[in-house]
Image: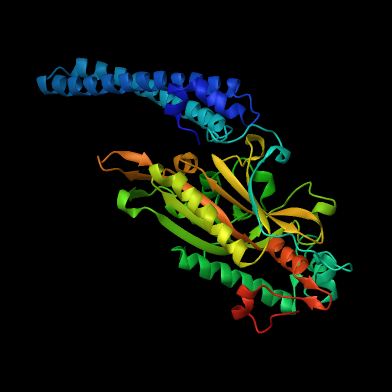
Amino acid sequence: MLQLQKIREDKDLVINRLSVRGLDANILVNSVLELDQKRRETQVKLDDVLSKRNTISKEIGAFFKAGNVDEANRLKEETALINDNADKLRKSLSDIEKELNDILYQLPNLPHESVPNGKTSAENEIVMSKGDIPVLHKEAKPHWDLAKEYNLIDFELGVKITGAGFPVYKGKGAKLQRALINFFLDEAEKAGYKEIIPPYMVNEASGYGTGQLPDKEGQMYYVSEDDLYLIPTAEVPVTNIFRGEMLKKEDFPIKYTAYSPCFRREAGSYGKDVRGLNRLHQFEKVEVVQVQHPSKSYETLNEMVDYVKSLLEKLELPYRLLKLCGGDMGFTSALTYDFEVYSAAQERWLEVSSVSNFESYQSNRLKLRFKNENGKKELAHTLNGSALALPRILASILENFQVEDGIEVPKVLHPYLSFDKI
């Protein structure tokens, strides 16, 4: 959530930066400022009323002490009217604050000054590419055909059990999936991340804390009887560990990693781009999350990008790095880099990771603060990255490493498996 002080002090800058997202925020920003002014004026009135009540209460005591009961009773009647007025002002203040927060929740994060203008993914900036595109044999197949041929993933069985987008991994397909998970977690531990296993469902406060609510409410699976949401990514429960926390400067950096299944409704997704593992309702992912001092968050973002690069290079997968334009960037992000791996059989790039700096946007919602060297309270910065999402990595391995008589396994995964070829 954007900080009110920032909007008050630099309204034009806020509107200008949000325009990079393709958003005309004039009406929303002006509404915020009007409500903020109304809120402060109402607070002043309430403070005055409460101050007057305190003064009269002292006078009542003095009159009773002096034996002037009639005057004391008259003032008690006046106090009752003051209390009624105070209750009305409290109610008015609560209503204004709710309306103000509802509008603030509609405002996305301000894009970093380096974020390119643009409305769609076609306008994302390609930062770099690495790795050779494999040349496959003439009978090469997409991963959904390979999965069926070698009995690795059963998409039809998943439909029978649950529905489309819930595949069943079998035999060496399941083992390869597990090998990737363990490889990612081991690499995260080497990089200084502490592993945790978080809950796979969260409450509403957690959804609001990291920005999934209200922005992505329709994309999350909701358990109405218990008022809980299935997580779309481990970022949500992991980051919410720090909701309402007061940290110390020496606590930074805080580095957590977590493996989890992820659940996304992906409403409206259809067509060839979502075939096989390309887009699922349930998938697995290893996430890395950092809580960092504001002065070091962009240095940390670059380190996290380099870390994801190292994973893809160890897997020997050709990839490219993109800086997302304003219109393609997530609601809560200030700057996001996407990684795409080339799928040789599909002849297209597949997104496999997003690495983002949220600056203080999530922290403001979470009330995640720290005390600086002067003892002043500041909002921390939060960052996260997919390291990595499993479905498209697995799809790319199956496709890019296929040979005429099977599928070879990347060398870095051999220690995790009892086979090096399918």
Q: Position of residue 106 (x, y in %)?
A: 59, 33
Left or right, residue 128 beside residue 99: right
Residue farthest along the right direction in this orientation: 139
In the displayed structure, would residue 13 be above or below residue 164?
above
Toward the viewer: 405 or 146? 405
Q: How many marks?
A: 0
Q: Residue at x 49, y 49 (%)?
A: 301
Toward the viewer: 58 or 247? 247
Q: Quadrant of the C terminus?
A: bottom right
Q: Position of residue 335 (x, y in %)?
A: 55, 41
Toward the viewer: 55 or 369? 369
Left or right, residue 14 beside residue 71: right
Left or right, residue 151 beside residue 263: right
Left or right, residue 126 beside residue 193: right
Q: Residue at x 60, y 24 (%)?
A: 25
Question: In which quarter of the view is residue 18 placed?
Answer: top right
Q: Position of residue 81 (x, y in %)?
A: 36, 19
Residue farthest along the left direction in this orientation: 66
In the displayed structure, would residue 65 be above or below residue 183?
above
Q: Position of residue 284 (x, y in %)?
A: 65, 63
Q: Can the viewer see residue 343?
A: yes
Q: Can the viewer see residue 236?
A: no
The image's colour scheme reads: rainbow
In the displayed structure, would residue 418 be above or below residue 295?
below
Q: Residue at x 49, y 39 (%)?
A: 361
Q: Residue at x 57, y 72 (%)?
A: 182
